[in-house]
Image (cartoon, coloured by chain):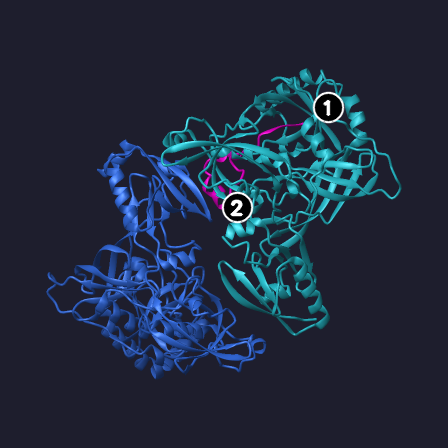
Chain colours: A blue, B cyan
């Protein structure tokens, strides 16, 4: 018993002496960083709309964000506030204010909201952004936010990796692809649901990333969007409400292990694996197997998958409509290909609930047509069908594309919307939809339950 | 405890009363001569994992030269339930052994499985010419509700003797979705067993009603409909002698299936749609799409046409669930059969009636019927593309060619390199691949040349990519 006590005392002493050397400066640094960013931390409660079950549903969410401009601009995740109808924020001093969505970008999972400061008496503290290109593996960082809705929580860890790559197929809960134009900062600072949108802070008190995701069933494997990406995206959102990108329609693949096959040197070129249908790349005659050596005379390479986002971003950052000169290796010949970029455009189209008919639709964007293997952008995409509804009964299913209502074509969202409004106000009891489903036509007759339709109006 | 005992006795009494009408011993004695156990060894794959599995099915010798019918439902890989579970049974069994009740065993050659009745066919390959005792079925058209049938079931391998008997009763004579003698008292382990009437006449075998709720459904659509579970309960009844005799005369052979095919996508003309279009017919087939160069195409059928008569007879399909009846009718007519349709064509609010004739073509192969090739070095099984692939992925049949990766063994060169079942291989090591024959030839050439790495160019989910497979000869 005495012996044990002696040992524990010794250990305690050892620790004290050890900390005596390191702790004061580390602790001081942590306190400094805390003081610089914590007052700018925001607890965000947005109400978002969801259309996946065939009707519009409101969901209340919890997320985090950080004020980065004294006018009240807050950066958070797209998956937190990107589809917000209304937002309530709780500031560091526990005061609650409303906020408005300025704009969002699903591709980088960033949204910007602006606080309504008309009733707020104090002045805001804005956090400063650092430089995510100069962070290092092993560097201490703090994560701040509202894990599991527990506001104003700070956790500490190190940077585990500076450029973690996820394939472009990674999707947000709302269905959009994300991460094509960025790699991620990996950290072991604890991040839980609710931390989303909160800042990852270095010990100088600068925000180096926006925490956005964690690995389920794993401990302390969390990811943040590098702040340099966030800065570019947020200034575009503040200036124009959205992010505009150039698109040429190529899917690339790392060249590692394939250099021998294609006869390229190490760290030379970007391999095109796939060409999107009806894209500028297809128009320009680019082919799968082509290797892009130079873009506007600037050498490019993607030997490893981690290098792909930067290459995609290089293309995306050109103004829409630019002519890009590509130097391409095809077989053993070098050829020159001009591609004129189009706008990437919206990934998903706008949502609409056909309340009386029991389903929800989305306008079809170019990217949706490519991603969902649709024949073209004509018609309207059925995003959800209520299980107990005339539409479900009639055989309508999620993924169908409505081309005609009562055999009159509805090629664009507006046509569909006008026709829907016209028929529902006329209280038509039967509606015939002509839909496309995996390359085939189908006729769907919807018996409109007038009583239910009027009931739900209440 | 008491209640259990009582109901057990009741069951016994019920059994005794009706069993008295059968001379079970006599029927069983003759059944012993032609009833067999069919042991099938098949390859089953779940995603990338594949394993050999053994199935034991009851079988019946139906010809003197050793043609055997058996329950093929277990190895039917087009079964949507298997597809839903991600399970793929390789349609061709690796080996079949037929065991008689006296213990004699023979190897057998697989012939095929009928898509609708799930009756499997194989032929005994005896070293010396042997004349087998066989069963002949007799069609009975006077079966009534309340009639009793006797059957024999295969008991588990660890008991002896291996045949047990069971009786069941006709519970309903269904007319919808098709004419079907529904029974009660039998269980689905007895599917494929011969049914005898009280005279000892073999009137058919126990089968399952082709579930109309399930027919033609994709796995994902089945998932969506799972809340209506009662629609998926098996309904057991009689596959009658006429059907079996027709199949015996012309067993469904793999690769040479001659089901009839019209080449349309279809939906039922429901009363609601008929009324909406001002059509008086109750029931019909709405043509949703006409496959290019199909019999329907050459006959001039168009999307939106409605077939109301087949061979002069009115089509009464007025619900989606009953489409399979029409599909089966067309299939049963067989390739090359002439067919006459009466169709309605709508235009400008008017409806014209047209008579159209065409010759049915041979139905396209299903994925499991497609010719395949397994490469023992890469440990992948490839198959030809079939009609369904083009349909599912919305690909152009005229321009898109390749071979489909059917199975990839775990830990194989193929898996490590990144091949995934469902990939469609476009080129192997720079050579364009358009058929399983070309793929096989190229893989054999690669085996001879033994390169250190082989580059595949594949199509996957509407995108293409290069796959480098490192070899280890």
Viewer-nearest residue: B276 or B369: B276
Location of residue A242 by image quarter: bottom left
Viewer-nearest residue: A188 or B1: A188
Q: Position of residue A391 (x, y in %)?
A: 37, 38
Location of residue A4 by image quarter: bottom left
Dot 2: within a 10 Å radius of its alpha carbon, few (fewer than 14), some, or many (20 or more) residues?
some
Dot 2 falls on a residue whose secondary structure is: loop
Q: Quadrant of the N terminus of chain B?
A: top right
Determine the residue positioned at 38% across, 76% down: A324
Decide: is B147 above or below A270: above
Decide: is B104 above or below A94: above
Determine the residue positioned at 72% across, 39% down: B121
Q: Position of residue B159 (x, y in %)?
A: 75, 35
Q: Quadrant of the C terminus of chain B?
A: bottom right
Q: Which residue was labeled with disc 2?
A: B291
Q: Which residue was labeled with disc 1?
A: B138
Dot 1 falls on a residue whose secondary structure is: loop
| Residue span colored magenta | B212-240
Q: Position of residue B3 (x, y in %)?
A: 57, 22
Q: What count of labels does the image hold? A: 2
Decide: is B436 above or below B217: below
Whether residue B463 is in magenta: the answer is: no
Q: Chain of mark 2?
A: B
Whether residue B227 is in magenta: the answer is: yes
Decide: is A170 above or below B241: below
Mark 2 or 1, nearer chain start:
1
């Amino acid at each position: 018993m005495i012996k044990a006590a002696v040992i524990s005392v010794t250990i305690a002493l050892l620790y004290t002496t050890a900390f005596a050397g390191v702790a004061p400066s580390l602790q001081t640094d942590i306190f400094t960083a805390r003081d610089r960013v914590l007052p700018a931390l925001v607890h965000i409660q947005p109400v978002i709309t969801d259309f996946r079950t065939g009707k519009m549903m409101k969901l209340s969410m919890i997320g985090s964000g950080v004020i980065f401009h004294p006018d009240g601009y807050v950066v958070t995740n797209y998956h937190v506030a990107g589809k917000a109808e209304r937002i309530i924020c709780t500031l560091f001093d526990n005061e609650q204010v409303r906020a408005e969505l300025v704009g969002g970008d699903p591709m980088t999972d960033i949204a910007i909201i602006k606080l309504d400061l008309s009733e707020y008496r104090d002045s805001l503290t804005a956090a400063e952004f650092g430089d995510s290109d100069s962070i290092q593996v092993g560097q201490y960082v703090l994560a701040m936010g509202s894990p599991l809705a527990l506001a104003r929580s700070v956790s500490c860890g190190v940077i585990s990796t500076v450029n973690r790559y996820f394939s472009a197929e990674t999707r947000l809960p709302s269905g959009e692809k994300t991460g094509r134009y960025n790699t991620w900062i990996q950290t072991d600072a604890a991040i839980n649901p609710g931390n989303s949108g909160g800042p990852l802070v270095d010990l100088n008190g600068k925000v180096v990333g926006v925490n956005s995701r964690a690995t389920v069933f794993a401990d302390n494997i969390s990811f943040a969007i590098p702040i340099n990406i966030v800065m570019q995206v947020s200034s575009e959102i503040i200036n124009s409400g959205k992010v505009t990108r150039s698109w040429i329609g190529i899917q690339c693949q790392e060249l590692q292990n394939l250099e021998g096959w294609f006869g390229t040197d190490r760290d030379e070129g970007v391999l095109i694996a796939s060409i999107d249908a009806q894209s500028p790349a297809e128009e320009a005659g680019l082919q799968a197997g082509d290797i892009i050596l130079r873009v506007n005379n600037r050498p490019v390479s993607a030997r490893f998958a981690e290098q792909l986002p930067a290459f995609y971003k290089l293309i995306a950052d050109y103004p829409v409509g630019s002519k890009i000169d590509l130097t391409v290796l095809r077989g053993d010949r070098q050829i020159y290909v001009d591609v004129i970029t189009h706008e990437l455009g919206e990934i998903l189209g706008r949502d609409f609930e056909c309340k009386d008919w029991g389903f929800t639709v989305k306008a079809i964007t170019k990217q949706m047509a490519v991603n969902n293997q649709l024949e073209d952008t004509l018609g309207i995409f059925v995003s959800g069908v209520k299980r107990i509804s005339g539409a479900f009964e009639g055989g309508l299913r999620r993924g169908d594309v409505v081309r005609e209502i009562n055999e009159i074509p509805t090629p664009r969202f507006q046509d569909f919307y006008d026709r829907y409004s016209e028929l529902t106000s006329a209280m038509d009891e039967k509606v015939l939809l002509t839909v496309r489903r995996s390359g085939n036509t189908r006729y769907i007759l919807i018996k409109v339950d007038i009583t239910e339709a009027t009931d739900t109006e209440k | 405890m008491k209640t259990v005992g009582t109901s057990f006795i009741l069951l016994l009494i019920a059994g005794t009363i009706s069993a008295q009408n059968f001379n079970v011993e006599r029927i069983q004695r003759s059944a012993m001569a032609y009833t067999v156990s069919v042991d099938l060894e098949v390859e089953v794959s779940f995603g990338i994992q594949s394993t050999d599995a053994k199935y034991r099915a009851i079988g019946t010798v139906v010809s003197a030269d050793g043609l055997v019918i058996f329950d093929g439902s277990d190895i039917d890989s087009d079964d949507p339930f298997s597809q839903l579970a991600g399970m793929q049974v390789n349609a061709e069994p690796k080996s079949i052994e037929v065991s008689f009740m006296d213990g004699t065993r023979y190897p057998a050659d697989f012939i095929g499985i009928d898509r609708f009745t799930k009756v499997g066919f194989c032929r005994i390959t005896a070293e010396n010419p042997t004349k087998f005792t066989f069963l002949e079925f007799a069609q009975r058209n006077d079966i009534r509700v309340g009639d009793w049938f006797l059957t024999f079931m295969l008991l588990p391998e660890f008991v002896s003797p291996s045949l047990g008997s069971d009786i069941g009763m006709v519970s309903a004579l269904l007319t919808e979705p098709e004419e079907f003698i529904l029974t009660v008292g039998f269980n689905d382990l007895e599917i494929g067993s011969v049914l005898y009437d009280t005279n000892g006449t073999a009137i058919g075998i126990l089968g399952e009603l082709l579930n109309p709720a399930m027919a033609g459904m994709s796995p994902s659509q089945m998932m969506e409909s799972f809340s209506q579970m009662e629609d998926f309960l098996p309904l057991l009844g009689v596959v009658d002698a006429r059907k079996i005799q027709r199949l015996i005369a012309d067993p469904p052979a793999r690769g040479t299936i001659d089901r009839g095919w019209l080449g349309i996508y279809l939906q039922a003309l429901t009363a609601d749609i008929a009324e909406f279009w001002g059509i008086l017919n109750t029931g019909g087939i709405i043509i949703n799409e006409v496959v290019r160069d199909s019999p329907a195409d050459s006959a001039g059928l168009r999307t939106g046409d409605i077939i109301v008569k087949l061979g002069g007879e009115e089509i009464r399909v007025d619900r989606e669930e009953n489409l399979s009846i029409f599909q089966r009718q067309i299939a049963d007519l067989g390739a090359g059969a002439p067919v006459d349709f009466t169709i309605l064509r709508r235009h400008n609010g008017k409806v014209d009636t047209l008579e159209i004739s065409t010759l049915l073509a041979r139905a396209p192969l299903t994925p499991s019927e497609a010719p395949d090739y397994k490469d023992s070095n890469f440990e992948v099984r490839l198959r030809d593309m079939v009609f369904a692939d083009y349909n599912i992925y919305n690909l152009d049949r005229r321009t898109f060619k390749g071979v489909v990766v059917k199975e990839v063994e775990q830990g194989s060169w193929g898996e490590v390199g990144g091949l995934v079942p469902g990939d469609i291989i476009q080129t192997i090591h720079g050579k364009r691949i358009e058929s399983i024959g070309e793929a096989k030839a190229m893989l054999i050439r690669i085996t001879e040349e033994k390169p250190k790495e082989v580059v595949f160019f594949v199509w996957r989910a509407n995108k293409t990519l290069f796959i480098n497979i490192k070899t280890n000869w």
